Amino acid sequence: MRLNPATDVTIGVIDDAAQPVVGALIEPVNFRGGQGIDLILDPISIALRATTNATGHVRMHIGFRDFFNLRVTSDRFGIQLLRLNPRNRAPARTIQLKEVGRIEGRVTAKDPHDLRGVRIEFRSDTATMEGLATALTDEHGNFVVPNIAAGLIYVGARSQQGSSAMAPRPPKPFALQAGETAHLEIPLEGLVTVRGSVQTEDFHTPVAGANVSVVFGNGMQHAPAITDSHGRFEVRVLPGAMCVPAIVALPPATEADYEQVIEPWNKQVNVPPGDQPFEMPPIVLVRRITLRGKVIDHGGQPLANATVCGELGNHRYGFCDTDANGEFVMRLPRSISPQRYAVSAPQHDRNFEVTIVQERPLVLKAVDLTKFAKPIGPPE
């Protein structure tokens, strides 16, 4: 094991008025590793965290500068997850927290025993940060979020102890202004059983052990399932709009030859209320074919250790890596003909503009955009 030299990074935290934020807890969350973005494990993050001093600064002895996200926790600003400029590796940086709003609300239910312990999660999202908050209802169903970063608020919720009979129906995303208090009412409703299956397109073979997820409600709720020996699964969802079940993972033997082609998050079905199970059409997996090709750089030389994929619509298929000769072997669904290709080298923070030099055999020319990019602005 080779240890890199230790590197100190000084973080300055300010508010919207550029005043220092004192007593904020700073924790690194993600960093750039050899294969892309890696998560810093909780025990390590806890060991590295520090609290801002009287001038709003912390000095973090973290051993690397390529971290992406910082979690900042303070009484005034709540929890905010800030995304840093990946190309800024300066030893001193300044981050600005976003002003907050407040959320008050209650959960309603026919049975008062269902009101306590409902877990509600909130997230606000902007271009550079996320605000995070969690609340638990009291015995009357009331909850309070004293502060969360202002912005578009996404709400997720689940019943106490993972109840399989009832689920909250949280609202769709809504805007929260700084200094504003939003009032919510979230009803608990009965769930409906949805059944489905996974099979291959050519032999209609049932696929056991497939990991399936169904998004329902306001789009922030999901129900996971694993197919049985007959390729069947069952989930409980709120009645109403539900996304087509999505394959999260397939058994290795199946994944080598098949994949789901549709974009399930873009297709919805309506689940009627009632006690009768709702039967979904089967998820049909499409067989994969092999596509071989080569990537060259702007000078015509092979581009090694780059990641390649095909693009069709808003979806990417066939992720693979080039070898020392710039050659790759891509596995694509047989029904897919990529409209374009993407090439990247995440370990070196490089992205490329790709053109097709020839179709057969496939040769892609990738021009490194970072070499021709204009200088970036000042550090955070």
Image: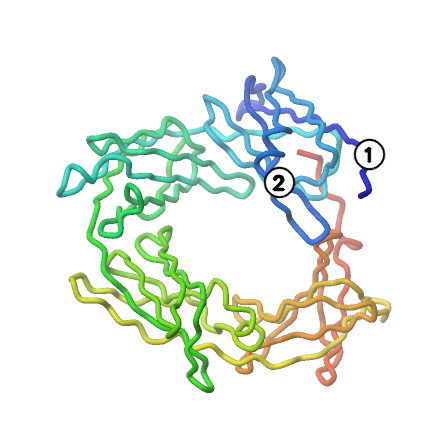
Closest to the observer: 1 or 196? 1
Residue 85 placement, left or right of 262: right
Look at the numbered disc 1 and give the secondary structure of its residue.
loop
Residue 205 placement, left or right of 60: left
Q: Residues within 10 Å of mark 1 (few under 14, many from 20)?
A: few
Spatial distance from mark 2 to mark 1, Cα to Cα? 19 Å
In x, y percent, where is residue 56? 61, 19
Residue 360 placement, left or right of 42: right
Query: Which residue bears the numbered disc 2?
Result: 40
> Which residue extends farthest left?
110
Callout 2, which amino acid? Ile
Residue at 28%, 31% in the rendered image: 143
Q: Is residue 361 above or below residue 14?
A: below
Question: Which quarter shows the C terminus?
Answer: top right
Total labels: the figure holds 2
In x, y percent, where is residue 71? 55, 33
Closest to the observer: 339 or 136? 136
Look at the numbered disc 2 and give the secondary structure of its residue.
loop
In x, y percent, where is residue 271? 24, 64
Residue 238 placement, left or right of 123: left
Residue at 62%, 40% in the rendered image: 40
Residue at 83%, 71% in the rendered image: 325
Query: Which residue bears the numbered disc 1?
Result: 5
In x, y percent, where is residue 62? 71, 31
Callout 1, which amino acid? Pro
